[in-house]
Image (cartoon, coloured by chain):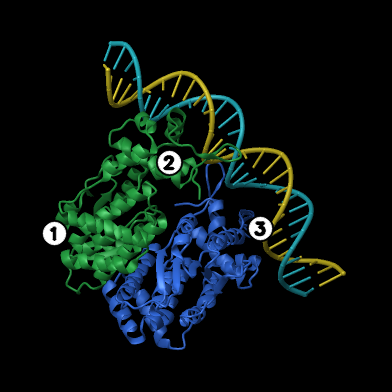
Chain colours: A green, B blue, C cyan, D yellow
Amino acid sequence: MTYSIADLEQLSGIHSHTIRIWEQRYHALSPLRSQGNTRLYDDQQLRKLLNIVSLNKSGLKISKICSLSDSEIDELLDQQFYYSSEDKNDDYYVGELIRYGLAFNEQSFNQLIDKSIEQFGLADCYRKIIYPLLLRLGLMWRKDDICPAHEHFLSNLIRQKIFTHINNLPLAAHSGQKWLLFLPEDEDHDIGLLFASYMLRMQHHHVIFLGSKVPLDSIKRIFSTLKVDHIMLFMIKSRLVPAAQHYIDELSEICSTAKIHLAGNSDVIGKLNHIDHIHWIGTLDEFEKTIESPLHT
Amino acid sequence: MTYSIADLEQLSGIHSHTIRIWEQRYHALSPLRSQGNTRLYDDQQLRKLLNIVSLNKSGLKISKICSLSDSEIDELLDQQFYYSSEDKNDDYYVGELIRYGLAFNEQSFNQLIDKSIEQFGLADCYRKIIYPLLLRLGLMWRKDDICPAHEHFLSNLIRQKIFTHINNLPLAAHSGQKWLLFLPEDEDHDIGLLFASYMLRMQHHHVIFLGSKVPLDSIKRIFSTLKVDHIMLFMIKSRLVPAAQHYIDELSEICSTAKIHLAGNSDVIGKLNHIDHIHWIGTLDEFEKTIESPLHT
DNA sequence: TATTTTGTTTAAATATATCTAATAAAAAGT
DNA sequence: ACTTTTTATTAGATATATTTAAACAAAATA
């Protein structure tokens, strides 16, 4: 599987011109070439670019980043992401769960996650363990410490747990607030959205969960019949700001009668011109506050 | 969202040359054009092409198909797909479940599907209701009677049920047979695979479920440490036979020590040169027989 | 303010994809 | 065996994407 420079632009949010000049000036990437000299990137190169962008966002100069060795970059990435919980026990859980994942040991993973869900409840388990676990998985993928098979294996075990807990929720009267949850077509990671679905249901909201890769056109076709009060979506991937802006503008127009809640990559979302009825959810806490009162508007 | 003719080739398995000449001779499709005269297709056109291909596979000549009106095509598609169960009750279930889906009525959907799972067990419920339901959804999408939002909504409700039933399976000693389940990068629909996971677990097989969109490269990296006896994957989408053949050949080479079980689109799989250790699963019955005896090789 | 660093814009050349049109080959029907 | 229908191949023209290189603009830093 290889990417063109246009693909890389989409996946990283960095203009192709800039990608080229980083290569020329700092030897940032070293893509393969086609017979006719066209650049061909692989996952390795994509990861490297995402790492460079990430370190750059945190303040380092491109020239500086590219002068570092791979191991120095690894170290900086660790520092950047290393997030130590108040309770060291939580970190232990995360580490163990990942160890089980790397060994494809479903049984031990399930035992430990079941135990922690029982102990904390799913909401706190997500906050303390699953969310940090997902962050760490993302970092490990970028550092090439983990391959997609591991990530898929773990994601599906987590998905299984959240789906099960949603399924086991008791039926209850709705609060009257109706939420529509979905991800744009280029987004894959639906676990956050699934957890949001769980939390909303816990607060007796009415949830319509569509999951990932829903074409905006399809939202358009059904929106008028749905009469939802809120729309929630994630934009997790890096992307060019104008593309994100265009998407949000279109969504706003289609769903002008609903309040839109947007979560995900703050580097992108932070740069958008938000329209009135768009609410940027920056943190888990913020999300919980948003949904707490069933009577908010 | 628009497709290039190359995209359409990938999605339909029809060479771009052929797509063009069908347009020229029979006015099969009528794509928009870019400023510079390049063809631009939308979902509507993609569906039409898939319908043409499907009717063509069932024996009709291209010229004949393209001379038909939209409503005549709809009728033929209905005939082609209309699958009446022995038990009319099953058809009633399918119809009701779809009605609930179209109305985004989760509660009624869940009540009915829970009832039928309780009645038949998940295995028979899948065979009698869920599988026909998925087929019908696919047909409805192709006839534009349903839009992706409906399909996503229903898929996730079904996914939730199967995940829950997998989660609730009692722990039991494994048979010693280890199965690796995944879908190629261009495949989305993981419900069949998820059901296979459930069935294998019911037979006390050891299952490693990776889900959809796993890069082959990642399989390669982990295969040697996994020591699996069986690999199972689906190829559901239409695609060019040489591309499918190349994928299967590569997979065979990577996983030469495992038996590969392949299910999905018979039009594609039927044309492949199967290597010795590849087993084509054509029907649900066949699959059940395959996994019945925990001691088969 | 001056300098360095970084990102954007332009231009012309080349590579790749798509277009039309004609012909050859294969498959299906009679 | 012969015709019809369908698919594959080829060729030259055009559209789109990518490449290199240079000049320019903007931002950060000294």
Amino acid at the residue labelled 2: Glu
The quarter of the displayed image where residue A176 is located: bottom left
Whether labels 2 and 3 belong to a single chain: the reply is no
Which one is in front, A10 or A181? A10
Q: Which residue is mark 2?
A: A9
Which one is in front, B68 or B89? B89
Q: Secondary structure at mark 2?
A: helix
Q: Is residue D30 left or right of residue B249?
A: left
Q: Position of residue B209 (x, y in %)?
A: 40, 67
Extreme residue in the bottom direction: B87
CA–CA distance in space, label 2 to label 1? 39 Å
Give the class, few, some or many, for how many residues have Cα within 10 Å of label 3's Cα (few <14, many ≥20). Answer: few
Tag on residue A292? 1
Q: Secondary structure at mark 3?
A: helix
Tag on residue B25? 3
Which is in the foreground here, disc 2 or disc 3? 2
Which one is in front, B8 or A195? A195
Determine the residue positioned at 39% across, 87% down: B89
